[in-house]
Amino acid sequence: MTRCFTPEPEPPSAILTQLFVPPQSVDSSLGGLSRSSTVASLDTDSNKSSGNNASEACAEFRVKYVGSIENLQFEMSKTLQEPLDLISYIDAAQQDGKLPFVPGDEEMVLGVSKHGVKVASVDQCDVLHRHPLYLIVRMLCYDDGLGAGKNLLALKTTDTKQQQCSIWVYQCSSSEQAQNICKVLSASFDCALSSNKP
């Protein structure tokens, strides 16, 4: 089941899109929040897309890898439940030098499917990261605030024992690309959930 929030729209530079999968739940939701906590509209009804079968819930996107903060303990993970908390944590990590403000020049291919997210080199020879769908806790995108029209895509994952979490940050070329990644991931959750039904 996908839940949509559709209040007053905001300019693209202020839009934050989030995808949150609650622990112990099979429900996925996609909505939007800006840094000022105003909800922005984003249509994610999988029935309105071109379809929702497994082959159509796959896509590849060119992104740049900013960095990651790995193996955060459970207590820290509990403080990063809300989108604005996660954004603030990433901002603080950038200011403290734990994450760069600007990614490297090398583009990566971020593939989204019903199995999860895979980040590989452009030639697909080197797989840099794999994020299985069942370990993804939240995905959100937001304007990086640097004035270049770039959006950051933050992916929060957990380990199999749900004792630690990691934050992976990628730079998208536009807010549209970042929102499309979130839409495809939402459709991937829907596909995975519908394929598990008897």
Image (tube, helix red, strand yellow):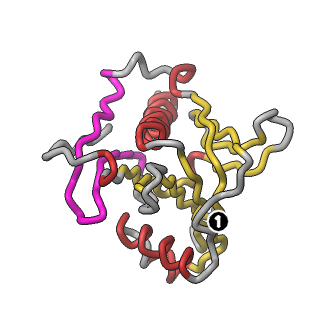
Disc 1 residue type (three-letter)? Ser
Question: Which residue is at the far top?
Answer: 50
Q: Residues within 10 Å of mark 1 (few under 14, many from 20)?
A: some
- Residue shown at the point (58%, 83%) measured from the top left: 96
What is the quadrant of the N terminus in the image?
A: top left
Question: How many tags in the picture?
Answer: 1
**In this rendering, position of residue 139 left or right of residue 2:** right
The residue nearer to you, when weighing 139 against 102, is 102
- Residue shown at the point (34%, 46%) measured from the top left: 29
Vertical placement of 182 versus 59: above or below? below
The residue nearer to you, when weighing 30 against 145, is 145
**Membership of 26 in magenta stretch:** yes
Q: Quadrant of residue 121?
A: top right
Vertical placement of 113 versus 146: above or below? above
The residue nearer to you, when weighing 149 against 163, is 149
**Membership of 47 in magenta stretch:** yes
- Residue linked to disc 1: 68
Query: In the rendering, at what x and y percent does residue 120 appear?
Result: 75, 42
Query: In the rendering, at what x and y percent does residue 150 appear?
Result: 48, 50
**In this rendering, position of residue 176 left or right of residue 121:** left
- Residue shown at the point (23%, 63%) measured from the top left: 37
**In this rendering, position of residue 130 left or right of residue 4:** right
The residue nearer to you, when weighing 121 against 59, is 121
Question: Which residue is at the far front?
Answer: 147
Q: Helix, strand, or loop for circle 1?
A: strand
- Residue shown at the point (31%, 51%) measured from the top left: 15
Q: Quadrant of residue 124?
A: top right
Query: In the rendering, at what x and y percent does residue 27 appear?
Result: 37, 46
Q: Where does the magenta region start and end?
A: 24-48
Query: In the rendering, at what x and y percent does residue 90 appear?
Result: 50, 71
Q: Main secondary structure of the magenta part?
A: loop
